């Protein structure tokens, strides 16, 4: 696994936690991105440590990790609570972006809360238990519109939302996919790949001609991520019509 310069501090901290678990400590991480989870998976290979993840609901992407020595059996408490937000749809159009922006404006670190799940009439946020009092007291408005927030004990079964897009490409090379999804030039895409800003399944991609498959997750720093979907058809000129799934804003 390639570790980028800006990831070295995180890698060192993760390695320290894994080594402490090898020495008998039970460690619970903060909420981790999918890339960070992949780094932990790489570090624990061949070590006497059990690594598991939990994010509060079945479809979670941002999750906490537990590091438990092999010889210890325990039911791990990840200390995750779910908060439910209700609001008046006449005055507020909720998006993932404006919920996240309001949370960040409270001075909270992003690693203290996990997925933000949008429902039809409500929003669910999975958070570390220690910041629940702050949110219940201070998270009262989004875009200056009042909201109601409360602890939610039932299971959340809402699946993440995706926007689907059809692209026409000459091959399944990663540079083709990235340039068409984000409307980047081939030179710009190549530069992003050379600088280590493009990931395939949360591993740094260094080869522009790497071939992708349906189900692959492609991430581009500062642009977002998408999942490669099915090959819909081949045009008369031999081009591929491919479906991609892009997380809704």
Image (spheres, grey):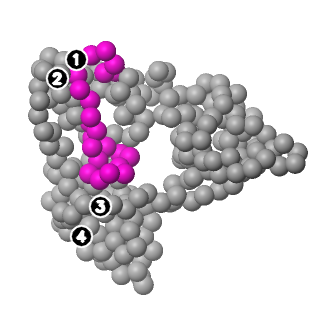
Q: Are the residues at dot 2 and dot 1 in contact (C-beta closer than 8 Å)? A: yes
How far apart marks 4 and 1 lie (CA) works out to 42 Å
Among numbered discs 4 and 1, the one appearing first in the sequence: 1
* Location of mark 4 (residue): 149
Q: Is residue 177 visible?
A: yes
* Location of mark 1 (residue): 48
* Location of mark 2 (residue): 69
Among numbered discs 1 and 3, the one appearing first in the sequence: 1
How far apart marks 3 and 2 lie (CA) works out to 30 Å
- Residue 99 placement (x, y as % from top left): 38, 63
- Magenta-tinted stretch: 43-65
Q: Are the residues at dot 1 and dot 3 in contact (C-beta closer than 8 Å)? A: no
Q: Secondary structure at mark 4?
A: strand
Q: Is residue 231 above or below residue 118?
A: above
Q: Is residue 52 magenta?
A: yes
Q: Is residue 28 above or below residue 233?
A: above
Q: Is residue 99 visible?
A: no
Q: Is residue 59 above or below residue 215?
A: below
Q: Residue furthest bottom?
A: 90
Q: Nearer the viewer, mark 4 or mark 1?
A: 1
């Amino acid at each position: 696994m390639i570790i980028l310069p800006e990831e070295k501090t995180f890698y060192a901290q993760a390695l320290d936690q894994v080594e402490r678990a090898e020495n008998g400590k039970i460690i619970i991480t903060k909420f981790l991105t999918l890339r960070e989870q992949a780094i932990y998976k790489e570090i624990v290979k061949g070590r006497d440590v059990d690594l598991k993840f939990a994010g509060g609901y079945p479809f979670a992407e941002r999750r906490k990790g537990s590091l438990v020595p092999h010889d210890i059996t325990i039911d791990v408490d990840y200390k995750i609570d779910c908060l439910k937000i209700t609001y008046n749809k006449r005055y507020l159009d909720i998006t993932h972006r404006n919920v996240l922006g309001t949370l960040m404006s409270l001075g909270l670190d992003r690693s203290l809360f996990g997925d933000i799940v949008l429902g039809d009439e409500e929003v669910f946020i999975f958070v570390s238990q220690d910041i629940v009092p702050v949110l219940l007291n201070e998270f009262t408005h989004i875009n200056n519109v009042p909201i109601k927030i409360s602890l939610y004990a039932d299971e959340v079964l809402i699946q993440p939302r995706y926007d689907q897009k059809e692209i026409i490409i000459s091959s399944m090379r990663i540079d083709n996919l990235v340039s068409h999804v984000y409307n980047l030039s081939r030179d710009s895409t190549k530069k992003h790949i050379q600088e280590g800003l493009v990931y395939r399944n949360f591993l740094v991609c260094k080869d522009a001609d790497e071939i992708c498959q349906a189900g692959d997750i492609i991430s581009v720093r500062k642009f977002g991520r998408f999942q490669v979907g099915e090959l819909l058809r081949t045009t008369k000129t031999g081009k591929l019509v491919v479906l991609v799934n892009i997380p809704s804003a």
